[in-house]
Image (spheres, helix red, strand yellow):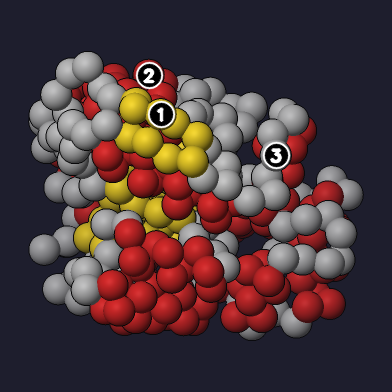
């Protein structure tokens, strides 16, 4: 199993804080490398939970991916993550991205310059965490002599990216690249190549690549494949626009999934019409967007992500037995 990426777990504000702490403790006990918190608008905020998980563990990396600079100003992001890093003893990782545009617009935020917002935020945050004064008159942010009044650490900053412009900026400035849910391995390979080339051109090391993937583990593989379909359906409805015109990033993911566009649209319409995932999504969706089966099957599926350049998988364990599933998946890892 040396061909496997590093394995972490992914949680979100859809899960209660105490449950997240239990999952973090199980992940650490099972030998996984980290826990990643996805912050989605209108769910629970994740900073308090991330702090609780940091306090309840000693080794696990505490990644938050992603926060967006619409809901939090870059100075506030630097303040919060410096505190989380201090609490965790240097285990914090900041993941930053533009966020889910439709949800942000519902809150009245301007999402017209997402790449500029993220790149400017990284510039401001980097300066503050390095103990420097941040001054910037950008397209989105303007700060004048901002400085933290305590000593912080230059913690790793990862960037979520999808468009070619964002991928190139990620390679040029970020320590890591976060690949979102619903990204087939073929598309990951293409995006990883753009990031790596940009890093080389900038004279920087290749960013660490972490990918989010839904996962279900069961003694019976068919049971696991049925269970993971609900997680796939939830992500599809969150990330794909209801209209038939999709952003380039979603078009590329659908094309790489192996599901014809007409079938993809029909599945989305049925899900949004209230039909249950197990009746709508067939094995093509599971193969493209998830890891599911017995524990050995899941570990074999995880290996294909290493083949396309992924360094770390952050798995969202689906179903009510997620703590047991973490243990079963990890049993047999090197």
Look at the picture and state if 243 lies above or below 57: below
Residue 173 place in picture, x, y as percent: 33, 59
Residue identifier under label 1: 144
Q: Nearer the viewer, mark 3 or mark 2?
A: 3
Point out which mark residue 110 bears.
3
Image-based side of 126 in relation to 316, left or right: left
Residue drawn at (37%, 19%), measured in percent from left and top? 48
CA distance for labels 3 and 2: 26 Å
> Gap between marks 1 and 2, in whole Å?
29 Å
| Label 1 environment density (alpha carbons within 10 Å; few <14, some 14–19, many ≥20) | few
Which residue is drawn at the image coordinates 63% and 51% (left, top)?
113
Tell me which label, 3 or 2, sits earlier in the chain. Answer: 2
Up-down relation of residue 60 to residue 235 (above or below) = above
Where residue 150 appears, as percent x and y from the top left, is 18, 18
Which residue is rendered at x = 61% and y = 72% of the image? Answer: 253
Q: Which residue is mark 2?
A: 48
Q: Earlier in the sequence, mark 1 or mark 2?
A: 2
């Amino acid at each position: 199993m040396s061909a496997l990426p590093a394995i972490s777990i992914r949680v979100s504000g859809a899960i209660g804080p105490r449950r997240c702490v239990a999952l973090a403790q199980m992940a650490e006990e099972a030998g996984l490398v980290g826990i990643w918190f996805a912050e989605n608008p209108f769910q629970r905020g994740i900073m308090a939970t991330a702090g609780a998980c940091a306090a309840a563990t000693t080794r696990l990396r505490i990644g938050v991916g992603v926060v967006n600079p619409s809901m939090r100003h870059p100075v506030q992001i630097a303040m919060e993550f410096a505190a989380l890093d201090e609490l965790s003893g240097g285990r914090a990782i900041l993941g930053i991205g533009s966020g889910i545009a439709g949800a942000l617009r519902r809150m009245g935020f301007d999402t017209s310059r997402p790449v500029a917002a993220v790149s400017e935020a990284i510039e401001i945050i980097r300066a503050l965490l390095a103990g420097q004064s941040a001054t910037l008159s950008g397209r989105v942010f303007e700060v004048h002599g901002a400085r933290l009044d305590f000593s912080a650490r230059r913690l790793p900053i990862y960037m979520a990216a999808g468009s070619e412009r964002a991928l190139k900026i990620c390679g040029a400035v970020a320590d890591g690249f976060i690949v979102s849910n619903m990204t087939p391995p073929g598309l990951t390979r293409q995006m990883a190549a753009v990031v790596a080339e940009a890093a080389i051109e900038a004279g920087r090391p290749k960013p660490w690549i972490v990918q989010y993937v839904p996962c279900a583990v069961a003694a019976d593989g068919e049971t696991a494949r049925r269970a993971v379909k609900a997680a796939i359906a939830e992500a599809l409805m969150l990330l794909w626009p209801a209209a038939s015109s999709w952003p380039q990033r979603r078009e590329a993911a659908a094309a790489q999934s192996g599901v014809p566009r007409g079938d993809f649209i029909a599945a989305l319409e049925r899900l949004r019409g209230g039909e249950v995932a197990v009746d709508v999504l067939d094995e093509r969706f599971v193969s493209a967007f998830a890891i599911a089966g017995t524990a050995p099957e899941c570990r074999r599926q995880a290996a294909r992500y290493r083949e396309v350049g992924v360094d770390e998988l952050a798995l969202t364990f689906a179903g009510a037995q997620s703590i047991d599933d973490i243990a079963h998946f990890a049993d047999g890892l090197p």
